[in-house]
Each structure stands twice: as C-alpha cells, then as structure tokens.
Amino acid sequence: MIVTTSETIAGKRIVKTLGLVKGNTVRARHVGRDIAAGLRTIIGGEVREYTKLLAESREQSIDRMVEDARAVGANAIIALRFGTSQTMKSAAELLAYGTAVIIEDE
C-alpha cells in the first residue's frame, strides 16, 4: 500500500476516494526511561529513550491506519498527517490519519 503525505501520487490517478482512515496508539512513559531521560536533560543531547518510544508509536499508528484502509478496500492513503494529545500526566496518544483512495496507473 502506498502511503504519502502528498495529495497526489506521481504516475497514478485517483479513481475513487473512500474517506478518512485512522490509526492510533496510547503510550505511557516508563519510570526507568523517565530517570534516564531526566539525566540526559542535565547533560544535554538527544533523549533516545523517548525518540525510540515515539518512533514505535508512529509505526504502530501507521500500521493500524493501513489496516483501516484495507478494510474499506483502499490501495493507497494520501494526505497522511499525525496528531498527538496528552491523555493523562504520563501517557500520550499518537494518531495517524489520512484519506483512503483507490489508485490506478495513468
């Protein structure tokens, strides 16, 4: 399945728009990661613990969005976007959403 942030796909034409598809995950922080991240904020640099957590969350959200698109018969998703929200003090939601479409070669 092609997934893109653009509204078009080079060499393809959209023959049918199926609508909004989405996938989300809610992740809680881990005390061990918080301690390591806190130490990193003192010395500076990338907070690798959270970089990894967010990367995993993005991938899981995309995978769930693709499942949603397949369920409605799509073979591509255009206009992919991400949204985030804090659900409680130590947990956040990451949402991937886009437009499910059927594409064909031009």
Image (cartoon, rainbow, N blue to C red):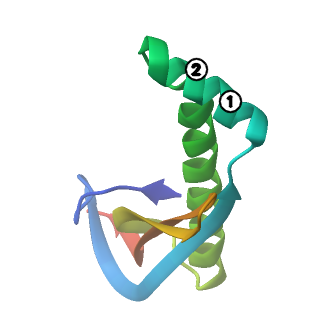
Is 34 placed above or below 6 here?
above
Mark 2 secondary-structure assignment: helix
Q: Position of residue 80 (x, y in %)?
A: 37, 63
Residue at (30, 57) in percent of width and height: 5
Residue drawn at the location 66% of the way across and 70% of the way down: 67
Between 53 and 90, which is closer to the camera in this rendering? Answer: 90
Residue 8 figure quarter: bottom left
Which residue corresponds to mark 1?
A: 35
| C-alpha separation, residue under disc 2 versus residue under disc 1 | 6 Å
The spot of residue 38 in percent (x, y) is: 57, 28
Give the residue type that dot 2 points to.
Leu
> Which residue is denoted by mark 2 in the rendering?
39
Q: Residues within 10 Å of mark 2 (few under 14, many from 20)?
A: few
Q: Is residue 35 left or right of residue 55?
A: right
Q: Are marks 2 and 1 in contact (CB under 8 Å)?
A: yes
Nearer to me, 91 or 76: 91
